Amino acid sequence: MFLKTSATALAGFYIVPRHVLGGPGFKAPSDKLRIAGIGVGGKGYSDIKAFYDSGNAEIIALCDVDDERAARSVADYPKAAYYRDYRKMLEKEHQNIDAVSVSTADHNHAVQALSAMQLGKHVYVQKPLTHDIYEARILTKAAEKYKVVTQMGNQGASGDGVRKMREWYAAGLIGEAKSVWCWTDRPVWPQGVEWPKASAKKAPKHLDWNLWLGTAPKKDFTENIHPFNWRGWWDYGTGALGDMACHIMEPPYRILDLGYPIEAECSVGSVYVGEFTRGYFPESCPPSSHITLKFRRPNGSLLDFHWMDGGIKPSRPDELGANEQMGDGGNGVIIEGTRGKMMCDTYGLNPRLLPLSLNDSISVKETLPRVSGNIGGHYAQWVNACIAGYGSKEFQELSSPFSIAGPLTETVLMGNLAIRSYDYREPRADGKYNYPGRDIKLLWDGANMKVTNFDPANEFVKRAYPAGFELANI
């Protein structure tokens, strides 16, 4: 098995970062970060291009289960070795690379990233960091244990907007936060639907379906799952919440310095397949949801943190004019404080105080360092931190290392525990079902990753893995 082989190989040699070989702070002028990409079509293509365009990176190896989707990357980086199986790539290329970028479907993030980290490789992982809460905790611990440079792909974390809002909040412009409202118009793929009926079609030759499944339960090839609609299926994706919350929840999460939530509850949209007959599609994420998380604040008060998706939005603030846009239209954030409110768009863009007239006169000193290139500098920031090394000044300034991205991802996925509990059912003697996870709130022990009042929810904290794709212990 690959992970055992990797562990044995790692025991036989010690990987020394190149900057250490030349002494503290050493960096050869020609030194570039050697990157391997796992998942190099679609978003993966733009990720590795951004690394390359930073000027400090080389693309050494490419890996994708879909040759057709990978074709553009293969053409753009003809010197890079190409693989379908990330395990073979890491086994053969680990001595030739310094870092790995993971841009695959959510369900494979953790096992791929951890395999690279165990080989001493720095990692950049697309959002959400992981599919499950347990995986996020493991990657957070692994980053510290293996002393590698990490970053999650929520590029808004490198933007000026979230820093400006942090400065406003620290200056007391809105007082103490009382509630947060986040919303998105996602999903823009099918959700709340029945699993497609079986067909005799086989996977096209350019796609290795079994490798794409990876950590997911084995199923026959199904059309219209890869390369995009997997987001709406629990075996592979994390729904609208997993897709957008790491972009939208990140600003208030950072501004308010939140930790683990202590409670979660939800309501979800219904799909009716007949008169008074609600569809039951437990494999699919719901068409819409409203999640409420509660956080304990340092002063002992509770903060309500709302998430809405599927087109559901909070009520317009009284301070917002009748014709003034809320958020960016489809997405946004409002933080309500004891003295006022502030609002921003996706990625923390366009921060403003409410009412908007306040923004003409407000002036708060910049106290936080900005990232060169703003949101676009998220990639170069990680590249430069990898070159400088673990513990360097560049490392300390990272916008979304796993020490931050891990707890944020756990918070995001806590909402999905509530959603999945909503569909949990138990058979009754009359042939019908009880749904004990509905109309309750989950009490969460964040330190121990455990729901304390509804045990069935805990099955969604950590899942089982098929042979060959296990998540290793650290």
Image (tube, rainbow, N blue to C red):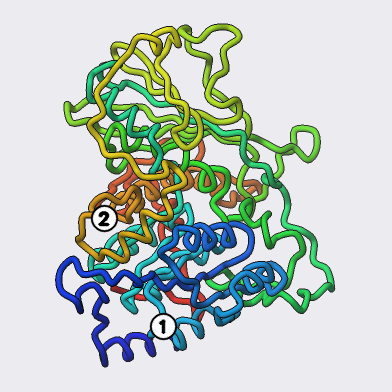
Compared to residue 426, the image places residue 77 above or below, namely below
**Whether label 1 touches label 2, CB < 8 Å:** no
Residue at 68% across, 44% down:
192
Q: Which residue lies at the image location 27% right of the left edge and 27% below the top edge?
A: 167
Report which residue position mark 2 lands on. 394
Image quadrant holding the C terminus, namely: bottom left
Local crowd size for mark 2, using a 10 Å CA cut-off: few (<14), some (14–19), many (≥20): some
Residue at the disc numbered 1: 96
In primary-sequence order, the first of circles 1 and 2 is: 1
Report x, y in % for residue 62: 55, 75
Could you tell me which residue is drawn at 63 percent across and 30 percent down? Answer: 311
Residue at the image position 32 percent from the left and 37 percent from the top: 254
Q: Looking at the picture, which amino acid does disc 2 mark? A: Glu
Q: Position of residue 196 (x, y in %)?
A: 76, 58
393 or 137, which lies in front? 393
Where is residue 273 shown, x and y percent of the image? 78, 40
Q: Is residue 21 visible?
A: yes
Q: Is residue 268 visible?
A: no
